Amino acid sequence: MANFRNDQAEGLRRMLAGPRPRVFTFLSALPDEEKNAMLVNLGASLVRAGSEVLLLDARASTGGIAARLDAPRRASLLDVARQEGRMAELVQAMPQGFGVARLAHATLQARAQLQAAPQDDLLMRRLGQNFDALAQQHDIVVVDGELGADDGFALPALAGGEIVVQVTNSAASIKAAYAMIKRLSATLGRRPFSVLVSGVGEREAKLVHENIAQVASRYLATQVALLGSVPADEHLGRAARLGRSVVEAFPLAGASLAFRKLAGRCSMGDVADMAPAGGMRMAG
């Protein structure tokens, strides 16, 4: 009876809290510059589609999205969990319309604290609770993620959302993307993933996806969906030099159309529900 009452109470709390935000954690087999450009343009496209968006820099390195945007140094989630900062100090509003927050500052001290955090149950519980509270203030959370030495995420809650690997059509990139999925599968167990293919059109993106999806299905028993693609487009660089998103600066560009389509997919439905296709072989 106690368990039944607890389940009822938890269900009631979820109803009162409203719909859960969608969390997309992005890993990348591309250089930081290309990943960050993608995150900025996706975030801006989601905002223009009507979503309240948060970009969370969850990387221990200095190459994350917060540094790319030159976001002012504010309290991080780790600071708040350690009671060295306040929730109200977490989010920095950006001109593109989304907010930016950090899991931790890219310092040696913060990295050491994050590495030691899994041994501190209270700290991990606070981190998770603070992330949930922060995410609940937004419709969509886009996470700039990376894999740790243990092949997991510094914030365990990220494993419960969508995990997307950015890839291009080079053999090295495809191999790196598959390696990430393989590492995550070994750590998280069987679960779906998605890929976002950059630098190519839709037809080539489908071939890249089929390549990865077939091998993941055969060797990992894991489904990989295609979130979408963004073609190579000179307007991306031109918009970046203007300090603007491509959807704002050049709304009719091919990349803008692709990002709007991506924003629509992220805003509606479950990306992981899209069935993967078969395709070319790749060594497991």
Image (cartoon, helix red, strand yellow):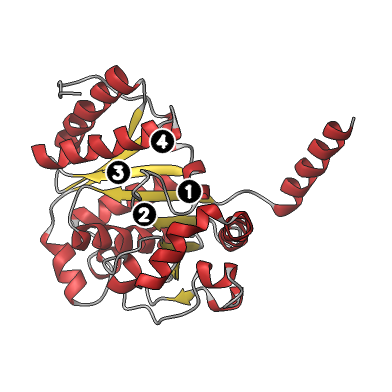
Q: On the image, numbered disc 2 is attached to which residue?
A: 145
The tag earlier along the polypeptide, 2 or 1, is: 2
Query: Rounded to the nearest whole Å, what is the CA distance between mark 2 and mark 3?
Result: 10 Å
Mark 4 and mark 2 lie on one chain; the one further toward the N terminus is 2
Q: CA distance from mark 1 to mark 4?
A: 13 Å
* Residue at image point 46% right, 77% down: 92
**Is disc 4 surrounded by few (<14), some (14 to 19) or many (20+) residues within 10 Å?**
some
- Along the horizontal axis of the image, is 3 left or right of 181? right
Report, in whole angstroms, how far the alpha carbon at label 4 lies from the one at label 3: 16 Å
**Nearer-N-terminus badge (1/4):** 1
Q: CA distance from mark 2 to mark 1?
A: 9 Å
Mark closer to the observer (4, 2): 4
> Badge 3 is on which residue?
165
Local SS, label 1: helix
User: Are the residues tagged 2 and 1 within 8 Å (C-beta)?
Assistant: yes
Q: Residue 213 shows which numbered tag?
A: none
Task: Give the number of the mark in front: 1 or 4.
Answer: 4
- Give the residue at mark 1: 158
